Image (spheres, grey):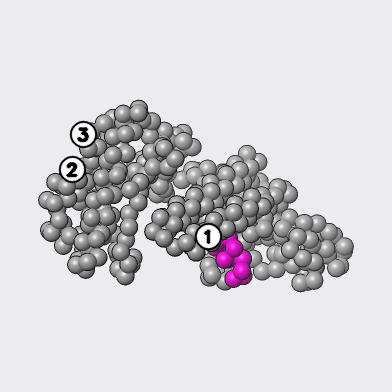
Amino acid sequence: MLLTVKTKLITTKEQHDSLLKTMEKFNEACNFVSIFAFNTKVFGKIGIQKELYYEIREKYGLSAQMTVRAVGKVAESYKVDKKTLHDFDLHGATVYDQRILSYKSADTISILTLDGRIEVGIQYGEYRKLEANRVRGQADLIYIKGTFYLMIVVDLPDAEPIDSDGVLGVDLGIVNLAVTSDGKVYSGDKCTKVRKRYAKIKAVLQSVGTYSAKKHLKKISGRERRFKKDTNHCISKEIVNTAKDTNRSIALEDISGIKENVTVSKAVRESIGKWAFFELRNFIEYKSKLLGVLVVAVDPRNTSRACSVCGYTDKKNRKNQASFVCLECGHAENADFNAAKNIMLRAVVNLPNVLCLGN
Ligand SMILES: [Zn+2]
């Protein structure tokens, strides 16, 4: 499985400054290229290179390959939208490839800067233990809160699937990001608070509308996205580890038949962003694959309306967002917990004939 891994660079002060200077020049060059491309409507890599190659190298002191990469970054960006002038953050990603970045050992890279090549230590984080084969090709250097990270594409072998004896049902949602059939609740409260806080700041910045306000807005959006991503990483990791440690498979609702934009109501979608929901699901799936945990998808119909004790299904069983009370047997509990148990039960009934995700 191909995966982009964020690896931290361990830099000295001098190396840090060197990389930062390189990053700034790289993006200054991107802005220079961007203005040219937008004004002349020459958006192709080759066309831009023909016109600007020598000028970029001289003006920004970039190496031949870095110049090509800067042009490439701008050309890629305009592929998506040619109607507005693209502005590149000076601390935006610097694009590297095997000509300007190489691996000296498992923990050391040699990376090109304006001061020449430097050797820097890297930290793989949670993938260190895994047998990762790096895939040659592009790697983005990014800068977050004073630290450099390299986004490396690696090819990770899937783990041997473990023989499971049991299923952990997981209900994904918005109010509760995830609830397991063990009763573990991953609340969305903190996400909601953070989102509301950012929404306020965003509204103010939008109304200001100046160039610097727009820049600030972009930064805020990035911060919010990273917060959600971190949250999803933590939750998915815990869920997958729980399944692995207890020798169980994971059951999720099958959403393959549902279009991404109709699974949640419009209001909900706007409030949290549908991608956050799909991202969590995605993380659970790939982390499972890496650890050999089987993920099964079950029929999603009525998981929130059926009673997990007697099976009686009625829309009215669900009193409100939070509570479930069975009109038949009186069984009462948290609605998402009840749904998670239904998801688990459906997988248990159907194993091993359920659909395996990712196959
Ligand atoms: Zn019941």
Q: Residue at x 87, y 62 (%)?
A: 330
Amino acid on which disc 1 is placed: Val
Q: Circle 3 is placed at which residue position? A: 116
In screen coordinates, is 211 left or right of 60?
right
Could you tell me if residue 154 is visible in this image? no
Along the polypeptide, which appears first: circle 1 or circle 3?
Answer: 3
Q: Main secondary structure of the magenta part?
A: helix
Numbered label attached to residue 222: none
Q: Is residue 198 visible?
A: yes
**Residue 273 magenta-highlighted:** yes
The region drawn magenta spans 265-274
Mark 1, secondary structure of its residue: helix
Foreground residue among 352 and 219: 219
- Between discs 1 and 2, the one toward the N terminus: 2
Q: Which residue is mark 2?
A: 61
**279 sits to left or right of 28:** right
| Quarter where residue 19 is shown | top left
Report the residue marked by disc 1.
204
Mark closest to the chain's N terminus, 2 or 3: 2
State the residue at coordinates (80%, 57%): 333
Q: Amino acid at mark 3?
A: Gly
Q: SS of the residue at dot 3?
A: strand
Answer with left or right where residue 79 lies relative to residue 302.
Answer: left
- Image location (x, y in percent) of residue 167: 66, 50
Q: Nearer the viewer, residue 82 or 298?
A: 82
**Would you call the spot at circle 1 few (<14 residues within 10 Å), some (14-19), or many (20 or more)?**
few
